[in-house]
Image: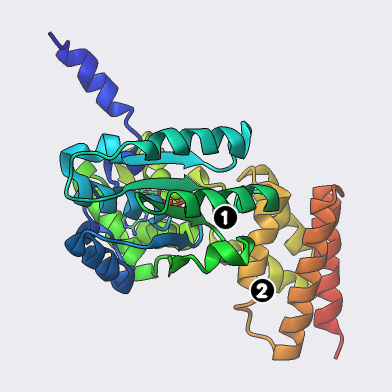
Amino acid sequence: MDDPKHSERASEFVPWVEKYRPKKLKEVIGHGPVVKRLEAYVKNRNLPHLIFSGPAGTGKTTSALALAHELYGEQFGQCFYELNASDDRGIDVVRGKIKDFARTLPFTEVPFKIIFLDEGDAMTQDAQQALRRTMERFSSNTRFIISVNYSSRLIEPIQSRCAVFRFSPLTEEEIRKVIETVSKGEGLKLDKAAEDAVVYVAEGDARKAINCLQGASSTADRISEADIFKISSRARPAEVAKMIEFAYKGRFGEARQLLDELLVKYGMSGEDIIQQMFREVTKLDVPDRKKVALVDRVGEYDFRMVEGADDRIQLEALLAQIMLLGSSE
Ligand SMILES: Nc1ncnc2c1ncn2[C@@H]1O[C@H](COP(=O)(O)OP(=O)(O)OP(=O)(O)O)[C@@H](O)[C@H]1O
Ligand SMILES: [Mg+2]
């Protein structure tokens, strides 16, 4: 017998990204033309090799799973095989597994199995060559779906054997739909400012949006803008913009004070801050040539920090640079 208390507790720990992962293609938010073509494949019970290309959290894995569930129904388990290409056991093991998997055909009307290869762009050139040969060898009864962030990282012979589907970051409206689904399901109360904050921090990534809601909900049912920024270590965009403006107008002391707050009060890392500065600098109301110079500076200081220079010193130096740009003609 299931202990109800236990299962209740267990269900609390289901990550919402899994709980709200669309099961059917038609439930996938956005990507209209992509979904339509995938549905046609299901209807015709046939598909070419596919590349799903796009940034994190936009629905690549979700769509592959939904496609396979619709194709195979109950036989899903025997017909869909998920592999991670960045697996350190190497392509040889992968090849062995693919061989075993592809050898037998299931009793379905679908004459092929699907191998879903995640993080395909983590493969070395050699591994990709090996994959290409494997694809050829088993093409009679296997289809590959290769998920990548950038399809250009795949070698040409693989690209040319696949139909490429691009998953773009979700639009603001689409992220709002994701938020609506989750908050309805969980009975969350979000005001407009909080919802805007989720859209801001998600940057088109549905996974980020959902994780940030789950994180914020653990402290309160009514979620505020501040909760969202805190959980995602982001500052309110207005504050970052204000810091840049102060610096630009020569009010260095005040800019520094705001920087202090971001580092100490919000506990943001230098990298987080500079990312947000980049976003805000492009929205600043200054002449274009100044904007170009500002973006250039932010890029330069970002690079220095990546190279290991001290965060605070670099950020203060960047503010000083912004001040110089503001005071020069
Ligand atoms: N288009 C979408 N519609 C609805 N929910 C989505 C969509 N895209 C992503 N999600 C949500 O985000 C979660 C992560 O999505 P998914 O695993 O498909 O991302 P991905 O594109 O494969 O990312 P990665 O490149 O990191 O592997 C899903 O479980 C789902 O909850
Ligand atoms: Mg994925």
Q: Quadrant of residue 258?
A: bottom right
Rendered view: 77 above or below 17 = above
The location of residue 224, given as percent across then percent down, is 38, 50
Instruction: Look at 49% across and 43% down and name the residue there.
Output: 231
The residue under label 1 is 235
Instruction: Residue at the far left: name it.
Output: 1
Q: Look at label 2 and name its amino acid.
A: Val
Q: Look at label 1 and name its amino acid.
A: Ala
The location of residue 267, given as percent across then percent down, is 64, 42
Task: Specify whether 296 is left or right of 169.
Answer: right
Mark closer to the chain start, 1 or 2 = 1
Query: Which one is in front, 113 or 190?
Result: 113
Query: Which one is in front, 202 or 24?
Result: 24
The location of residue 272, given as percent across then percent down, is 65, 53
The residue under label 2 is 281
Q: Which quadrant does the C terminus fall into?
A: bottom right
Q: Which quadrant does the N terminus fall into?
A: top left
The location of residue 131, given as percent across then percent down, is 56, 49
Task: Specify whether 163 is left or right of 285.
Answer: left
